[in-house]
Image (cartoon, coloured by chain):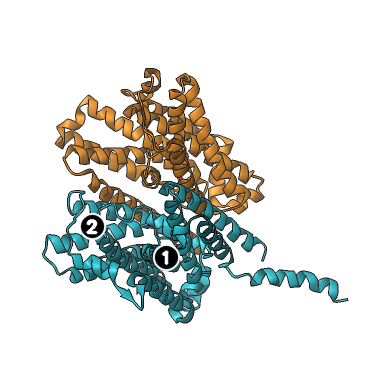
Amino acid sequence: MNTPTATPIATKSAKRILPPEFGVTIVLAVIVIYFAAICPNFRTVENFRLLSKQSAQLALLGTGMTIVIATGGIDISVGAVLALCSMTIGWLTMNAGWNIWAACVASIGVGTLCGATNGVLIARGKLPPIVVTLATMAACRAGAAMFNGGHSISGLPEKLNTTFDLTNIAGLPLLLWLGVVCLISGAVVLKKTAFGRQLLAFGGNRVASELSGNRVKRIEAMAYVLSGTLAGAAAVLNTAHKSTATPDAGQYLELTAITAVVLGGTVITGGKATVLGTALGVATISALISGVRLIGQEDRLAWFLVGIALLLAVEVQRTRKTTP
Amino acid sequence: MTRPSVRAPRELPIVLLLAGVITMLCVFVPAFRSADNLKAVGENAAYIGIMALGEGFVIIGAGLDLSVGSIMAMSSCTMAVALQAGIAWPVAVPLGMAVGAVAGSINGLLITRRSLPPILTTLATLLLFRHGISLATHAKAFTQFPDGFKQVGAGWIPFLLFVALTVIAMVGLNRSRVGRWTLAIGGSEQSARLSGVPVNRVKLLAYAISGITAAIGGWIVMAFNDNAQSSIGQGFELDVIAACVVGGIRITGGDGSLGGAALGALLIALLRNALILTGRPIDQYGLFTGAVILSAALLEGWRAQRKSRKLQAEGGVA
């Protein structure tokens, strides 16, 4: 008598068990296997090292973006904040004669400040995140261009580039370690700390979260502060990689970060987030771009494919939501 | 007894701001008044404004279209390719509009049929359309368009077209059934659906219109510059959304006027012009746009708070 009713329940729960990272894992596997099969240069250790170095910036921004999206918000200013911070490093070292490391710390400070501006306006001013970060995006991009009349600042000290690009720890690039550590810290903060829990609770239902006695304004603002700080840190990596500070650095990086996060299975409306998914999303985008370059195609094909991947990811997310 | 409240029109702040900016420019910057400069401002305002009309429709219906810049590139390149292939311009232009409409409908269909979030869907199509047309045309630059085609970018024609389309759009939003439905959907999609509004069809139409206005914007820009390339209109979505927000359209939908969006576009064009005329680098323009968007948002937030307080007070009395 129980058998007929038990079957649908079993399939239902089986569907629920599918982790949010399921889709991105398959996409990543397909991309890696495909490029590894058709392109011998793709499956070399050297390419893996290069790829992991290139992903570091995106890993940092993706972690911040996951935290912001977990609250149900969005931060489209990160690319512009990165450019502003990068120009800060360039200007402080070349024009103000600062020590390069002090300038890097200042860059992280500037990023935090930008994030705090976003956070205060969104949480205190109760303004829509997309409008606020759209405004700060425009302002930061303009600010970045004002340092050197819209030109880039080159000739930064060698040691910045050598430290970040050439250092290895335990045989792996420093940049890979940085990205991984950042992602793991993000995951720990989100899943294991009271702050992370409050973030998710706030993203799930802000009214309920407020009524439960959480300091919602502070929590929401903190998400944007963290995102800004990480953008400042990503600016250090960006500047180090090119040994040049450019005002148009980080263009489209906010879109890439959002894509990586959504691809990874974090729900855009907030309340559910997975940093592991973001890590896989970052890896997917990096592998795709690297593979497309190695088979001799241009970046725009990669971006076209990223667009398709994003649509598919959103579609999968929707299917998961409607068939619980 | 409730008194009929005397509410300042939503466009009041932007009208005052515009009046201030225009007065300042006229008084302090003599070069502003030259006919050539005014025409350039008119052209700038025209393409941002026309695109803002379509975007405004979408935003009022509680959507968002980030792909307008990319749709612009797609339809511009289509028109350019058609013209190069020797197709007469009166045929090529509708072809470009059709491409815009189809691209907008793709957005609309994904958003309505598959109920995907607008911001993500149009973010994805931003990438798809832009890089798709870039792949198809190999980022080739097109130029030397026929004179008839370039008419739309000459003299006061773009501005007049903009004014005409604004009037049509305002009447369309406020007087037509579809316009009212759009406002209703923006206010509450659930209520609109339950009241029998064909929500999906109206939304689809809004995105298609946004695609068409992006195509018209593309026509004006390529006619004015006599140049089209797959990178045309990069980042325009921000200017266009800024024009809507500054013009008093509520970003979450349900409130606002397309006349406001048009005025917002005019303000953005004027600010850009002011920076150029005063010899400041064009890069600083973002600072002003940012400041203007923020002040508009703060004003909107303040309005909403005052309104809810007023409603609470009224509720308390009753």
Q: Residues within 10 Å of mark 2 (few under 14, many from 20)?
A: many
Q: Which residue is mark 1?
A: A48
Q: Chain in cyan?
A: A
Judging by the rendered image, the residue that carries numbered circle 2 is A245
Point out which mark residue B278 bears. Answer: none
Pointer 2 chain: A
- Residue at image position (50%, 53%) is B120
Quadrant in the rendering for residue A76: bottom left
x, y percent for residue A322? 65, 61
Position of residue B293 measured from the top left corner of the image (x, y, whole percent): 34, 50
Amino acid type of the residue that numbered disc 1 sits on in the rendered structure:
Phe
As drawn, the residue found furthest toward the front would be A40
Label 1 SS: helix
Q: Is residue B236 above or below residue A273?
A: above
Q: In screen coordinates, is B79 left or right of B190?
A: left
For the colour orange, the matching chain is B
